[in-house]
Amino acid sequence: MAKRTPLYEKHLEYGAKIVEFAGFLMPIQYTGIIDEVLRVRKGVGVFDVSHMGEIEIRGPDALEFVNYITTNDASKLELFQVQYSAMCYPDGGIVDDLLVYRLPDKFLLVVNAANTEKDYEWIKENKRGNVEIENTSDRIFQLAIQGPLSERVMKKLVKEPIEELGYYRATEVEIEGKKYLLSRTGYTGEDGFELYGEPGEACKIWDRIMELGKDENIGPCGLGARDTLRLEMKYCLYGNDITRDTTPLEAGLSWITKFNKGDFIGKEALLRQKEEGIKRKLVGFEMKGKGIPRHGYAIYKGDERIGEVTSGTYSPTLEKGIGMGYVRIEDSKPGTEIEVDIRGRREPAVIIKPPFWKNASHK
């Protein structure tokens, strides 16, 4: 049976269309995907992301262990700093992509909702050193407040000087006597914040943010808008653009793969791939006509099939079809003309240098 987040009743109250996603009943949209995307690009929108997983790692060897199970270098994290990272299998395939928070008494790993149990088991299986591993997902709600006007709204909510909070930094804040974790992060490309707290406080905080954001024309946004916003930034989605059959190097995530930090799971396989050279690469492309690419569509160059679409949609911000897909490395340069097979018709497209949306407001 599908779970409900602490904000489920609020979604019904705001007229959301509800779908099952990653084992949860979640809002796919409220007023419409296009409207919600533009709200975030121009103003501020609020997402319930309480379905995301949270795994805490504590103990004397926590740093060494986090460094062993993730590809990025957690030793570079300062206190209350956040890092984008990935976990890999020994063959270099991706277990999941995630955020790593370095907090005073623990590391907090924020993982994809569909992967929470799998990730938790994987982390436990690979346990080494003196560490405690705990899945705290059910004890945390998470809100994402996103858009160029998000700071204006959050300054009304918290007393702390959050205008000084840097990108991918976090802090503890107090709201009406309760403590929360607040980070300047998000999955939209715009300036924004993610707020973590106890589930019992979720509805009260939701109502407060909606009230305080009235002047900024704030509104709720669903998973449909979130997926479009992340694609406009060429942010990967696990299960589509990255899977256990893709590696960080193929997905353009070599920047979060630190070979000089010591041992980590997948290092040998990834080093071998780096030395041999990747055979395919994840690219972004824009449609030249009115076609909308979708997951699974074939990508051609001339008569040759050179890859497949992993994510595709209509971009309300750019007013055209956009997509991502793996293509042969020799056909992956920006400017390369390709065709996407859309229901039997070859529609022209061009590979671009990411992101698609180049005027994002993140700090």
Image (tube, rainbow, N blue to C red):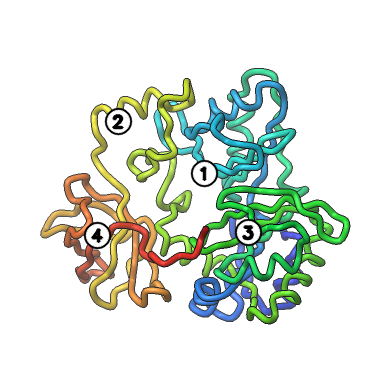
* Labelled pair 2, 3 in contact (Cβ < 8 Å): no
Distance from disc 1 to disc 2, alpha carbons, whole Å, reads: 21 Å
Q: Amino acid at mark 4?
A: Ile
Q: Earlier in the sequence, mark 2 or mark 4?
A: 2
Q: Earlier in the sequence, mark 1 or mark 2?
A: 1
Q: Which numbered mark, 3 or 4, is in the foreground of this view?
A: 3
Distance from disc 2 to disc 3, alpha carbons, whole Å, reads: 35 Å
Q: Examine the image and state in which quarter residue 210 appears.
A: bottom right
- Work out whether 28 lies above or below 62: below
- Most foreground residue, 284 or 189: 189
Mark on residue 274? 2
Q: Mark 4 = which residue?
A: 351
Mark on residue 84? 1
Distance from disc 2 to disc 4, alpha carbons, whole Å, reads: 23 Å
Q: Amino acid at mark 3?
A: Phe
List x then y, in percent, for residue 273: 30, 30
Residue 91 seen by the camera: yes
Q: Amino acid at mark 1?
A: Tyr
* Labelled pair 1, 2 in contact (Cβ < 8 Å): no
- What residue appears at the point 29 percent right and 74 percent down from the top-left corner? 291
Residues packed near mark 4 inside 10 Å, few (<14), some (14 to 19) or many (20 plus): many
Left or right: 110, with 137 as reference point: left
Q: Earlier in the sequence, mark 2 or mark 3?
A: 3
- What residue appears at the point 74 percent right and 74 percent down from the top-left corner? 212
Mark on residue 336? none
Q: Mark 3 = which residue?
A: 193
Residues packed near mark 1 inside 10 Å, few (<14), some (14 to 19) or many (20 plus): many
Q: Earlier in the sequence, mark 3 or mark 4?
A: 3
Left or right: 58, with 243 as reference point: right
